[in-house]
Amino acid sequence: MIKIKPTLLVRTFVVFFLASYHAEVFCAVDQILSDNFFMNPAELNLINKLQLIGGGVIINPSFFFRGNSYEQYGMAKSDATDFLPYLLSAYRCNEEIVFGINVTPSAYGHLNWATNSIVAQSSTLTKLLYYRYGIQTSYQLTESLAIGAGLNLEDNAQYKLNFVVPGQGNQINSVRALNYTYDLGLYYKINSKNYLTIAGYSSVSSTGYGTSSTSEITNNNFSLNVLEAPVVYLGLRNILNEKWTMTEKVYWSGFSVQKNIVFNNSTSGSYTIPTNWKDVWSFQATTRYAIKEKLALLGSIIYETNPVPLATNAIGYPLAASGSLSGGVDIALRKNLSIQVIYSYGAFLPNSPINNANIVGTINAHFQAGVLQLVYKT
């Protein structure tokens, strides 16, 4: 990315697809919307005594650009693979109260264009991985209604936005920040076969501090705005019979908070780049079917709307409407121990168009994710 071009954007929020142990797959730009990572705190009331969930996600986002960039026609590819571990715990204190402690990723993005590619002046590396350290509790108000709340520390670290500046080389911009968020939830038993779940998470809007450097220059007072959108969702869980359950959810992610990207004290100066994102809607359905006493099949489908207008879509964060499919198995290893293995595949629907003063083309994207986790409960 050249040093002050307001029509070019350098922040990428990679849409990717993550499967939870219910085979539920969600996406919301950079936010990882699964039942584990954006869980409803009120649903802790489902814990009998103790539950431990530990696992990891192997994620592979792949992007391919074709078009004209800085008066050159050609292609460029970004391919990355990352591992995201997580741990969740919950313990029932008494008949009404359940308490939990979680360590989960809350946002992820990774694009890795070659420094000699035709898009290098727009982006060479976009990498972010945010983690949430949270405490949550639920309270059983009535036989049919539970409420919950949580307090979280957001570790907004591993945030890098790199691009080539003519005459300077590859500029490396890196910041980190710590922020607090909260979450609220409600879980209601409509009848013996249908349940309502509602939850919301607050946003992050702050500034991260770090360094901006090239091979010859380093600014140690660099800063960049750090954002995570608020999230609210509503869902229904349906018990069709003793073997088969389904869940349908609608998510709203308030990405209209993403108005600008503000660079302060980079090696190429200070400037603001407009983004003007829109809010995102995600529509998802999942299913679990027990084919044997110790074996169940898991599946999910999702579609999500596009948050970014064409005028500000760019190599730094290529986005489009997207969808994914996933499937897996849930295997009971012992009475209190089970393992889930899930694979998910998603793509832009359709390709992401890039049309600004310096780059005109399209980006297709494919996302693969594998989940392996263990669940222990008593």
Image: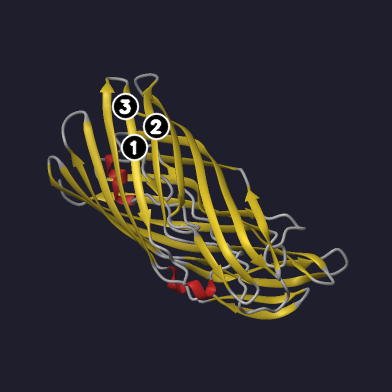
Identify the residue position indicated by label 2 in the image.
328
Q: Is residue 124 above or below residue 334?
A: below
Please indicate, yes or no, whether residue 34 appears anywhere in the rendered image. no
- Contact flag, marks 1 and 2 (Cβ < 8 Å): yes
Identify the image quadrant of residue 109: bottom right
Which residue is pictured at 42% across the width and 71% down the height?
278
Where is residue 12 shown, x and y percent of the image?
57, 62
What is the number of callouts on the image?
A: 3
Q: Secondary structure at mark 2?
A: strand
Q: What secondary structure is marked by label 1?
A: strand
Out of 70 and 79, give the one closest to the viewer. Answer: 70
Task: Please provide percent x and percent y for residue 239.
Answer: 18, 38
Q: Tell me the residue that label 3 is attached to.
A: 296
Amino acid at the residue labelled 1: Gly
The residue to which callout 1 is attached is 299
Q: Amino acid at mark 3?
A: Ala
Q: Residues within 10 Å of mark 1 (few under 14, many from 20)?
A: many
Query: In the picture, which quadrant includes the C terminus?
Result: top left
At numbered mark 3, what does the secondary structure look like: helix, strand or loop?
Answer: strand
Q: Which residue is nearer to you in this view: 268 or 317?
A: 317
Corner quadrant of residue 359: bottom right
Q: Residue furthest right?
A: 216
> What amino acid is found at the position of numbered circle 2 in the picture?
Gly
